[in-house]
Amino acid sequence: MIRAVALLWSLGPLLWQLYTSLRPADALVSGPQGLGSPGGGIFGGWTLQNYSQLLAADPPFWRYLLNSAVVGVAGTALTLLLAIPCAYGLQQQRGALRWGTLALLLAASLFPTALLFLALLEWARQLGLGNHLLALALPYAALSLPLAILLLRAALADLPPELEDAARLEGLGPLQRLRFVLLPLLAPAIASTAILVFLFSWSEYPIALTWISRESLLTLSAAIARIGASSVFTIPYGAFAAATVLGSLPLVLLLLLFQRAIVSGLTQGAVKG
Amino acid sequence: MSVLELRQLGRRVGGRTLLADLNLRVEAGECLALLGPSGCGKTTTLRLVAGLELPEQGGRILLGGRDITEEPAGRRRVAMVFQSYALYPHLNVTGNLALGLRVRGVPPQERERRIDAVLELLQLAELRERRPAQLSGGQRQRLALARALLRQPALMLLDEPMSNLDAQLREELRPELRRLLCGGEAPVLYVTHDQQEAIGLADRLAVLEAGRLQQVGTARELYEKPHNRFVATFLGRPALNLLPPRDGRQLGLRPEHLRPVAEGGLAARLQRREWWGSQQLLWLESEQGDLRMLLPAAHACPDALRVGWERHHELWFDAATGERLQGLA
């Protein structure tokens, strides 16, 4: 019973969006009383008109998906590239240096990013980063780094220290230990960190909105907001819903894909038998 | 010849002395057991020798006459078997063995040949595809040992390698371990808190307590001529009886040296009897405190008795310092 409620609670809004996206625009406002009218009734008048409208627009909607994916992948890759050595280096430190840095990182990761976007915009203007899709990966990586380092450091701390000692005695240098021993064991933590960073960059709005103005370079969140605000007089609910559905599909796929990697990673890491 | 020499080795962490002034020499092919209660500095000694930690200023580690104190761990040609085995969980048996050889640049054919040989030696050939999680405790220990032997080390270190195994397996593995480790070129340092294991495996024992070396010698030397009270009580089971100190001196008597006597000795009452097969351990309450006495199983023992011993079995200690007083026995 509780499970059913929880399922409804989390899936309800999504299903409602899906439903809305498949309905003609006027059906949404006409309600069940317009049974006789075209597209009347709760289950009548299904249409893909909202989707076709989105995909036929200029630029087509998949362009935004692609933009977001490019930014997300670049941001995630950059974050991991920096966070893994940082976390490893931090774990090598002892005492005040380690704990002080961790406290600072925690403070940084708790800082509300929305307060930063004006200052960041100033920088982007000075450095000429506006309207460059990949430039968005820079602030995304910067903002995700503290949390990513914290997560990966915690995962490193969970590995038995003798593993690295053993590798050291076998003649493996620091990078070889990272590459051959630690990284394979950190795979689950890296996967979940990557998902978090990717989700953040997928849904980030203020920076994407202010750094990008060219229509063909918009990321998903900025593009969807633009659809919603396309007219002063009406809100195109159907198109809006279709955009959200299309925008979340890749995420659902990604999570399903990664979930498997995480689960297999967890059983692989089991030391006790 | 690779001889291990430790000179003035010490280690302090945050004002706490883990090890102080350790001087020790292990001959080529000799197996020396570092023995002591937990926290006595035996694992610290191993980690210093391995190069996983650095000693305090002035401490020196020499291997085969060469000073390796400053040398990085990976270059010391020292292999170590960890208490937890520290097997790479994501690699199978072959992978665990191959990694070190690979990064040290051993060519693939030789790698394969050496791995096959060591797998054969340790009877792991059937299990080469298994991950550590799919191995039993004894198999994991053998794999850890295989990895260490594969290193062809100039010095072998073992940190409580059997503490995760059950008592029976430990006893079975002892001769095998001795056959594999001892008598080669490399000296062996073997850390354990189990005196049975130390006596069964090692040529000599070094007893540590609170970071200080108490005594080095063969098991027999340590048993018969302990330098101090700690060594005397730590070695020998059941443990030494210590009578209450008197006039700054304290008498220690081994349970196996006590006998019921007709007259003289101490008056005692029998409290409890433990049967040990061929022997019995008798728990006695005497005018000088509780005593343990070990007798042949067949020996009858009344409830009230007198306990005696021979003078040459007496171990006298300075009550304050614990040093053994020579020439009093």
Image: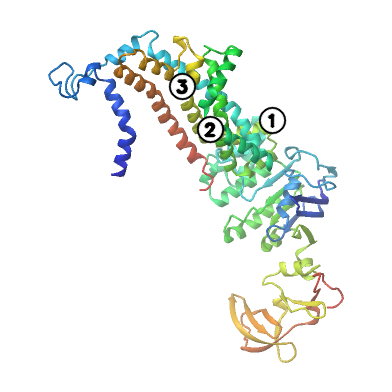
Q: In which quarter of the image is residue A258?
A: top left
At 61% across and 47% down in the image, what residue appears? B85
Q: Do the residues labelled 2 and 1 touch (CB within 8 Å)?
A: no
Judge if badges 3 and 2 mark residues of a common chain: yes
Q: Where residue A213 appears, x then y in whole percent? A: 48, 11
Secondary structure beneath disc 2? Answer: helix
At 34% across and 22% down in the image, what residue appears? A245
Q: Mark 3 lies on which chain?
A: A
Secondary structure beneath disc 3? Answer: loop
Q: Where residue B270 appears, x then y in whole percent? A: 62, 85
Q: Which chain carries label 2?
A: A
Report the amino acid beneath label 1: Gly
Inter-mark Cα distance, 1 to 3: 50 Å
Query: Total marks drawn?
Result: 3
Secondary structure beneath disc 1? Answer: loop
Q: Which chain carries label 1?
A: B
Instruction: From the image, state whether disc 1 or disc 3 is nearer to you.
Output: 3
Visible in this render: residue B259? yes
Q: Indicate left or right for A18 with B78 as reference.
A: left
Q: Which residue lies furthest to the bottom in this view?
A: B263
Q: Earlier in the sequence, mark 3 or mark 2?
A: 2
Which residue bears the numbered disc 3?
A205
Which residue bears the numbered disc 2?
A190
